Amino acid sequence: MATVQVEYAGQIQINAGQNPRDLYSHQNEAIKALDQKNQSSFEGLLVLPTGGGKTLTAVHWLLRNFIDKRKKVLWIAHRHELLDQAFETIKFSAYPSLLSDVEKFRYRVISGHPKHDRPVNIQPTDDIIIASKDSLNSGLNHLLNNWVKHSDAILLVVDEAHHATAKTYRKLIDTIKQDFQKRGNESGFKMLGLTATPFRTDKGEQGLLKQVFPDDIIFSEHLRTLITRGILAEPVFENLATNLDFYQELTTKDIKAIEAFDKLPKKVAEKIAMSSIRNKRIVDHYVANREKYKPLLVFAIDVDHAIALNAVFKSRGINSDFVVSQLSDLNTGAKISPKENSDKIKRFRAGELEVLINVEMLTEGTDLPNVQTVFLTRPTTSTILMTQMIGRALRGQKAGGTEKAYVVSFIDNWEDKINWVNPEKLTDDDVEFGDRDIETMKKIARLISIEKIEEFARMMDDSIDTTALEKLDFLRRVPVGIYRFSILEISESGEPESRNYDVLLYNDTEEAYDSFVNDLAAIFKLVSIEDREILTDEELGYLLQQTKELYFPDHPFLLGYRDADVKNILRFYAQKEMEPEFIAFSERRKCDLSVVAKHIYENDLTRRQEAEYLASLWNSEKSFWKVLFDNYLYFKKQVDIEINKLSGVYGNDLPVSIPTVIPDTVPLENLSLIEIRERDPAEYREIKDVVFAKYTNTQKFITCAVSGFKSQMRRDFQIDHIKPMAEGGLTTLDNLQVLSRKAHTEKTRLENSRRLGVI
């Protein structure tokens, strides 16, 4: 039976080296308070502001006091990103200074995310389970029977504990606690809540939170203290009224759209961006306070605004420049390259640029320790975006930043029609500053702007935010497959010539594209082009809109989605009446540079041996490295980055040794279809096509296995496990069926109800 390695479960071996992470004084104070409380059973809170190191503090404490004492730990949160953060912190904290009595311990990460495990696989030997509360609630019996009942002592850690007043949290906590009570072992249950916001905004819930954590706050530290200690910079908020009105042209629909999507209508954005009066006031204010404000980071409304502001700054003798995600030369059509942006940011860091203007590019991940001031020249309704913008200047002196940070807002007159975010309120003690609850897909979408694999590789190499890119799973940046086709187009000479097109498919878009392409024949029934091969602009626009609504309803948040790709496939089908060829990256997992780096690192290759090994990979006709990187130097640099990770070198940090994680090996059939798609897109498509073929008749009608509903459009159906995986079902052809989406929704509802004991 075939087996595969999974990263969501396994064991962590204790590293013999020295722990490279030192705690700040407030974290050590928190650990002392927890040690005192740990002398008896407790259910209390650790309260630290964002940036104060809640996760690292808790991990250091639980490793020494629970894992090292062979006691169990259950870490729960409500988002899979928090689970990943917890696991990474635990993995890189497994050193003898915290773990002296154990050589290794087992872990398991559980959530509804495809890259995580399921409750049905929980084992009594698991030492620490890191799980989403929703997954555990749906698989509560597995947690209790396979783990809790086998444990004499458990520490339950609740991340973002201010959410624990929700019924789902309380049900999970009470169930585990009651199990210990039934066994007469009340002292075996302990609970620690982590939060930056000890009380929710609804005052009525404060009492309920105290009921969940009856020991209340065990230790807390405030934002003001961390600012005083230099860990965070002192924010100085300044407002400058522009005395300009921009609300007159707003309709009710515009106002709702702004509140919902945080995007100004084009006509209003253009009016603000091109306001010479407003731009002059912004620059005049800087010039009048130049010594106090520099170096300055400016957040502009859009590309036109960035260009206009930069021109005004330069006219006043200020050495400024701008960075934007995409800009085309009006004459040549050439696009600005990521390298140009990267060079400008390096010049800004080095002090060669006094002012750097950007359009939402430097809100996340980019390290700019020299920033003294941020100018908020664009309003926003997003607290996340606002905290990201002002957070660029709040790096404290102890972290290599500044003592004070100026946050200057330029306030226009909107007559209170729109609830813009007030940045000053975000630093109130009862508000969590710097909330990192960022939609993962939005973050990746801003990092990736590509048309070809080669361009993608260059972006990885020359990104303005190389640190963030290096932390991403390398395979996440590799497409799962590609549609390749050519279209005959009329050239400037009037003669048709063939133009090749590639549509890259990533995890986010592959499923939707597959249904879209399979349903092309039905989609084209919406228009009547008869024998024509070229769609009119109106027809193309209409089909594009219908396709987006039917197959890509979340298109703004999908990594790699582009209107142009959908249009090109529609144009191709109009011309050929056939599906474009799909080429799966069957060797995708062999495009993992971490494997290449591991071979070099573990075999301690000499420079010559390393060069020969990389050259053999680069020149191999069976490899994709040339396709991915286009340039050998880019390839070599990325290999070096992966080797640095293995040797424990991160950025300018000193080398440290890294604990070893040994993943479990499980049968392929234990994986969900989504997991199989991630590992082998070709195998996934073969399974899916076989299952759909089984439920498709000679007239191309697909039939639901439960309701008998029929349709020729694959988008109306999805593949489902007959015996759910949560109950031990496997991904085998005899356990897969096709259900209509309605039938699948009802089946899922019934299964969840049964698991929760509702029916």
Image (tube, rainbow, N blue to C red):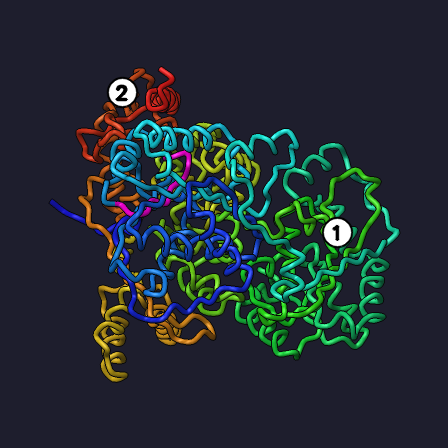
- What is the crowding at mark 2: few (fewer than 14 residues within 10 Å), some, or many (at least 20)? some
Q: Position of residue 719 (x, y in %)?
A: 30, 30
Q: Outermost residue toward the left?
A: 1
- What segment carries the magenta color? 126-136
Q: Is residue 116 left or right of residue 254?
A: left
Pointer 1 residue: 270
Q: Position of residue 585 (x, y in %)?
A: 29, 53
Q: Is residue 631 visible?
A: no
Q: Secondary structure at mark 1?
A: helix
Q: Position of residue 312 (x, y in %)?
A: 79, 68
Q: Position of residue 188 (x, y in %)?
A: 35, 39
Q: Nearer the viewer, mark 2 or mark 1?
A: 2
Q: Is residue 379 visible?
A: yes
> From the viewer's perspective, is residue 476 above or below residue 420?
below
**Which residue is at 75% across, 46% downward?**
267
Which quadrant is the N terminus positioned in?
Answer: top left
> From the viewer's perspective, is residue 632 above or below residue 545?
below
Residue 737 location, quadrant: top left
Residue 660 location, quadrant: bottom left
Pointer 2 residue: 705
